Image: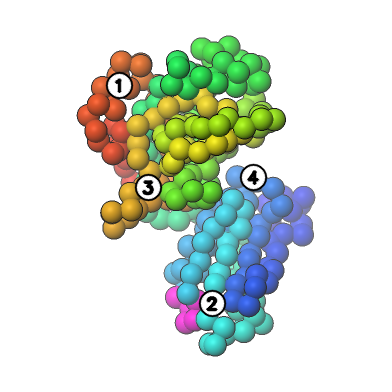
Amino acid sequence: MTDKTEQYWPRIRTVGFDGMLVSFGDGLSEPANRAALAFRAAVEAAGWDGIEESATSLVSCFVRFDPLAWGHDLVRADLSGLLAERDWYAADLPQGRRLWRIPAVWGTDLAPQLEEAATAAGLSVKDAIQSLSTSRVRVQTIGFAPGQPYLGELPACWDIPRQQALTARIPEGALAVAIRQFVLFSVATPTGWRHAGQTAIKLFRPESDTPFVLRPGDEVLFPAVSREEFENIRAAGDPDGGAVSEVIQ
């Protein structure tokens, strides 16, 4: 491993009667997220019989298997063998990732907590917009709601706490910030994260063959647009909300 503080990781644990969890840390870090994404891609590429599903969280890879074909001991042995093949914390990220540029309006009445978030980060509003709109972040995991990404890590100044009280409703397409991460909301929902930006992208498209637009490992920039530009994007009715993407590798 690349960091001696991670000497007790990775760790393999049993999850129910048909699952195993391979964890690469007990807290979010770039190497641990990289390891989880790369390891999951390797599990998929291995094509082991009896593996029915794999998925990643922020720092872990979950594997679900057919308990009629495999037992926990056999799955653990194969996972242990794969773990021993390389330093997963320094592994290349999976192929086929995309870089997305998703226009966002920062602040205004559409994202009313930008100033509060900037104050918590020790920045002026202008510097906060510059920081947030130019930070290239990774989709670390999808969760909480269909197609909803957690993105990071942001610069250290954005290690700000969540609110102590919930915002009753944050709209679809909202960009909220806390603990060096963005959440880009795929549905309207209550939240404790501060609403700093607003996009027009529709992340969850159940009618599509690929209902989740963003995937773990993708990278995202949120370039700033004016309120007028944003309203024009939204009026166009494009589910991409003006976003463009390109293959990274």
Residue that sits furthest to the front in the current view: 168
Q: Earlier in the sequence, mark 2 or mark 4?
A: 4
Secondary structure at numbered mark 2: strand
| Mark 3 surroundings: few (<14), some (14-19) or many (≥20) residues within 10 A | many
Magenta region: 47-51
Give the amino acid at mark 3: Phe
Q: Which mark is residue 203?
A: none
Q: Which residue is mark 4?
A: 29
Q: Which residue is mark 1?
A: 231
Residue that sits furthest to the left in the current view: 236
Residue 88 locus on image (x, y percent): 60, 58
Alpha carbon distance from label 2 to label 1: 47 Å
Q: Is residue 213 above or below residue 201?
A: below
* Left or right for 175, reference 116: left
Number of labels in the image equals 4
Q: Which mark is residue 204?
A: 3
Query: Disc 1, disc 3: CB below 8 Å?
Result: no
Give the amino acid at mark 4: Ser
> In percent of the image, x 54 and y 87: which residue is there?
68
Give the amino acid at mark 1: Glu
Relative depth, front residue between 27 and 78: 27
Q: Which residue is mark 2?
A: 65
Residue 75 locus on image (x, y percent): 60, 78
Give the amino acid at mark 2: Phe
Alpha carbon distance from label 3 to label 4: 27 Å
